[in-house]
Amino acid sequence: MSQVIATLIEMGFSKTRAEQAVATTGTEDVQIAMDWILSNEEETIIQPSAQTSDLNLVDEPERDTTDNQSITEGTDDSTTSQVAKSIKCDDCGKLFSSQTDVEVHASKTGHEHFSESAEEKKPLTEEEKKEQLARIEAKLKQRRLEREAKEKLEEKEREMNRIKSGKEILEAKKRHEELETKKLLELRKKEKEETRLAKEKVKAQIEQDKIARKLKFGGMPPVEKVESTASTTAIVQRASQPQSYSEVKLQIRLTNGSTLVHTFGAKEPLSAVRLYVQINRTDDPGPFSLMTPFPRHIFGPDDFDKPLELLGLAPSAVLIVSKA
């Protein structure tokens, strides 16, 4: 195990992550390997393949072994050749043990002046290891805080989006309800207008009949018509006799066979029953009429404004909904 891997393990990194950092960067510098680990925290651990990361900085000069060459011995000015053991940054004085470390250092700092050095890079002391470990912990803590702050911000944005979406749904539902209410009011207004026009048409027809009778009989109504008028008056008088009922319970049968049961006021008009059916019906929508099964009677527009008690529906009755 190399000194760099051992140092990274002592700092708290896993052996696999330390081996991957050294194999990927090809460095013998603890700081560079540590920076790679911190910059690739989420990278999948890949088992490093066997590869050599040692860099021969300077090859030893080849020795001439020919018989013609001789070496002068005993001279005072002879010097021993030195082998470069590291590369030194002339800008900051830092030592590096591989060309990869030099390239990483140059890319990070912008330093450009390097030279070979016979100095051997010393291993980290205990104090240096503690200092690097403290820096690593500080960086990890800072990144963890940044990640937590980012997650909180994203969660806050998601919550705001949920609230906004909920408000939009409520507003859409409210607009839909207001539109449905407006449609019902317009429909009821239209029905009232149709009823009014029908009444006016009937009145106009009655007036025309009166004028025609006067012209035909010289101002005297026919005997048959007088008798019919008397019988009609008697029926109206009997129907208009005051009733003691205050409520009317109606059982309304829809076209699909289902039944609606509701209690109305005896003074409420038949149009209130029609509006109740329009709002609560479960069968197919569309124009409809109301009628009593026995005796069979279909209520027309003239009956819409008449009280339920006057129509003979008190205290209870059955109405059938039929398609108009």
Image (spheres, rainbow, N blue to C red):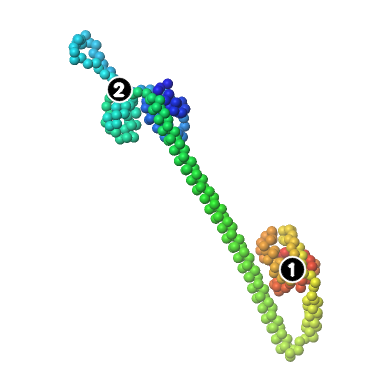
The image quarter containing residue 89 is top left
Q: Nearer the viewer, residue 280 or 285?
A: 280
Q: Is residue 128 above or below residue 252?
A: above
The residue furthest top is 67
Foreground mark, 1 or 2? 2
The image quarter containing residue 52 is top left
Provide residue 161's location: percent of width, then percent of height: 52, 50
Q: Which residue is drawn at 61% across and 62% down?
A: 180
Callout 1 touching callout 2 (CB < 8 Å): no
Provide residue 229's location: percent of width, then percent of height: 78, 82
Residue type marked 2:
Glu
Q: Which residue is drawn at 67% across and 78% down?
A: 200
Crowding near pointer 1: few (<14 within 10 Å), some, many (20+)?
some
Is residue 300 at least partly visible in the picture? no
**In the picture provided, is 8 more to the left or to the right than 311?**
left
Q: What element carries label 1?
A: strand
Q: In this view, does 88 lie above or below 178?
A: above
Quarter holding the C terminus is bottom right
Is residue 160 at least partly visible in the picture? yes
**In the picture provided, is 19 more to the left or to the right than 189?**
left
Crowding near pointer 2: few (<14 within 10 Å), some, many (20+)?
some
Provide residue 267's location: percent of width, then percent of height: 74, 71
Residue denoted by label 1: 265
Q: Which of marks 1 and 2 is nearer the N terminus?
A: 2
Q: Nearer the viewer, residue 279 or 212?
A: 279
Residue type marked 1:
Gly
Residue 289: mark: none
Q: Residue at x 71, y 71 (%)?
A: 269
Quarter holding the N terminus is top left
Residue denoted by label 2: 119
